[in-house]
Amino acid sequence: MTLILTALCKDGICICADKISQTWRNGVLIKTEDNLNKIYRFKSIPLVIFNHGINKFDNKSWDMLCCEYEKTGHWKDKTLEQISCNFKIFIEGTVVHQLVSNLQCMPNTESIKISAFVLCGKDNFSNNFEFYELCWDPDFKFNCWKDKRIIGSGEGYEKYLKKYLIYNAKLFSVEFWACINTKRAKEELKKLFFIAKKSRDKVGGDEFSDNHDIECIT
């Protein structure tokens, strides 16, 4: 239940994330809101983490986990790939525990079975911009998109934007994003977000919110 777009440009990374949040209780959806910031920015290094899927773990929010990890300092003197692996070790027990609990309490609710964290940043050793995904569904996956320039996350992307990008090959190409800066990338991601929104509205969908946040790393 989200729509997040991430673009690797010639001078950095841009992330555009919707703001939908849901509250569940005993297998029942209590409320849906348009107020959740899904992007966490580190203070000391050019790194952001965003979340999609389940975002609360034992009553602790996803960004609180990110904050706690940043305070440990375990990310210091590591490559971005090493930080991703280290962050996985830090949060995996908490994430898996919550997913197991969800599956026991709400076995027929698909949206509570997945949680993912995507780390986007500049590697301090290579000076390359990279992104890595940690995804539990509930089987752990580790993805590195070394050969991609734009990635989409969430049900909103799968339903309303994936086919559009495939049919509009230029917007899905490495060459297009590699030639534009973050300022231009922000505008392109906004356009894609509203294309998805228009498609969603045509069918009365509710997979992501109307509003969004945009963050860039340079």
Image: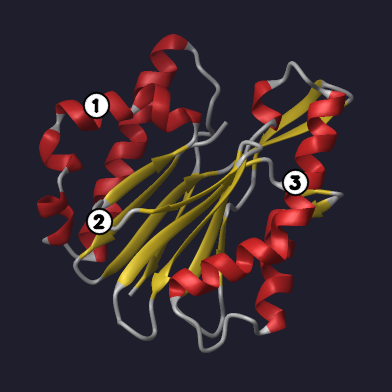
Tell me where residue 2 appears, x and y as whole percent.
Answer: 53, 35
Residue at image coords 71%, 60%: 91
Residue furthest top as drawn? 203
Q: Earlier in the sequence, mark 3 or mark 2?
A: 3
Q: Which disc number belongs to residue 216? A: none
Q: Is residue 20 above or below residue 118?
A: above
Q: CA distance from mark 3 to mark 1?
A: 34 Å
Check disc 3 and give the amino acid type: Val
Residue at image coords 83%, 21%: 27
Check disc 2 and give the amino acid type: Ala
- The colour scheme of the drawn protein is secondary structure
- The answer to whether mark 3 and mark 1 are in CB contact below 8 A is no
Q: Is residue 196 above or below residue 56?
A: above
Check disc 1 and give the amino acid type: Tyr
Q: Nearer the viewer, residue 198 or 89?
A: 89
Residue under numbered circle 1? 164
Q: Quadrant of residue 101?
A: top right
Q: Secondary structure at mark 3?
A: helix
Residue under numbered circle 3? 96
Tell me where residue 28 appears, x and y as whole percent.
Answer: 82, 20
Q: CA distance from mark 1 to mark 2?
A: 17 Å
Q: CA distance from mark 3 to mark 2?
A: 35 Å
Q: Of circles 3 and 1, which is in front?
A: 3
Residue under numbered circle 2? 185
Residue at image coords 54%, 62%: 49
Q: Secondary structure at mark 2?
A: helix
Q: Earlier in the sequence, mark 3 or mark 1?
A: 3
